[in-house]
Amino acid sequence: MKYLSSCHCGRVNLSLETPGPIDDYLPRQCDCEFCRKYDMYYLSAPGGILVVHAKHRLASLKHGSEQADFWQCSNCKSIVAVSSPFGENTKGAVNGNFFSQYMKLSCTKSVSPRLLSPGEKRKRWLALWMNVEFI
Ligand SMILES: [Zn+2]
């Protein structure tokens, strides 16, 4: 299934392809200050792909253990996705807020990744995240 969206100002286009319907993937709400501040929750479909097409430069923000890049539209300041390199691939999750119009269910699962060790985080991401391409 393919879903299209963009950041608040429309300068970053997002294309999400998921093996199953979007409602099969429960968005995760992180309880840290950073994620609450940017009002983001994480949506990823293992086996799926996210294509991020920015018409201008994305800013990369780091926080917590600094293992991942949080991609921010430099115009509207919304964070569209998070990613980290895994070998030759980049894996990540999208900010599910930008796809909520496609979701029938509005529930999210609360998670506390800040309580995990750096190694545990990588393992978790490998299992949950999808491939991300920046064009
Ligand atoms: Zn924007």
Image (cartoon, grey):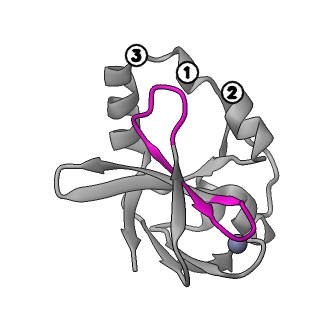
Query: What residue sits 51% from the left and 40% below the top?
Result: 62
User: Which residue matches tag 2?
Assistant: 32
Identify the amino acid type marked 1. Answer: Arg
Seen from the viewer's position, the closer of residues 29 and 40 is: 40
In the depicted structure, whether residue 94 falls above or below residue 84: below
Q: Secondary structure at mark 1?
A: helix
Residue 96, quarter of the rendered image: bottom right
Q: Secondary structure at mark 2?
A: loop
Q: Which residue is mark 1?
A: 114
- Of label 3 and label 2, which has the lower sequence position? 2
Local SS, label 3: loop
Start-end of magenta stretch: 62-79
Measure how far apart labels 3 and 2 are at the Cα level.
15 Å
Q: Are marks 1 and 2 in contact (CB under 8 Å)?
A: yes
Cβ–Cβ under 8 Å for marks 3 and 2: no
Is there CB contact under 8 Å for labels 3 and 1?
A: no
- Measured along the vertical axis of the image, is residue 17 above or below residue 122? below
